[in-house]
Amino acid sequence: MDTYLDQPTQSRPHVKTAEAKAQVRKVIHALNPDILALEEMGSTNALLELRGSLKSEGLDYPYWEHVSGWDTNIHVAVLSKFPFVASHPHINDEFLLDGRIFHVSRGFAELEIQPAPGFAFTLIAASLGNRFSNSHSSV
């Protein structure tokens, strides 16, 4: 999904147009997923607007998660028809690459989802583009 913003930001001046939002919803309706992980999501308000629009069109996702990270403009989100048993957002993770420590720019959503009694699984959603924030030089 292309960036789904409801408000312009300093680094992303363009919001999703009404026509583009309708196209996103059309694709989601065509797929009719039980669980939908979203990258490039704007604010919580943008997610709730998408969720509300889908619901008004007959596609209800009563469970949702919005995870922020170092990038304050773009986030990871999950919409689900099934309840979350547990949520463990990763918002401050680091990793070592070529002797340098990097922060993950966008958070990771880690959710335990229960689609049926006695059955649950863990979903991890991440946006792994090349947007890493270098926090320090080599250690």
Image (spheres, rainbow, N blue to C red):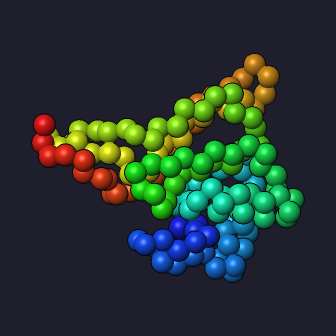
Q: Residue at x 66, y 60 (%)?
A: 45
User: Residue 122, position in %: x, y?
Assistant: 59, 30
**Is residue 28 at all visible to an observer of this figure?**
no
Q: In this view, does 63 lie above or below 18?
A: above
Q: In which quarter of the image is the N terminus?
A: bottom right
Q: Which of 70 and 130 is in front in this view?
A: 70
Does 48 sit left or right of 102 as displayed?
A: right
Q: Nearer the viewer, residue 9 or 111?
A: 9
Q: In which quarter of the image is the C terminus?
A: top left
Q: Is residue 7 above or below residue 46?
A: below
Q: Nearer the viewer, residue 112 or 94?
A: 94
Does 72 sit left or right of 135 as displayed?
A: right
Q: Residue at x 54, y 41 (%)?
A: 109
Q: Nearer the viewer, residue 136 or 39?
A: 136
Q: Residue at x 78, y 27 (%)?
A: 116
**Is residue 89 at all visible to an observer of this figure?**
yes
User: Residue 69, position in %: x, y?
Assistant: 45, 48
User: Residue 93, position in %: x, y?
Assistant: 37, 38
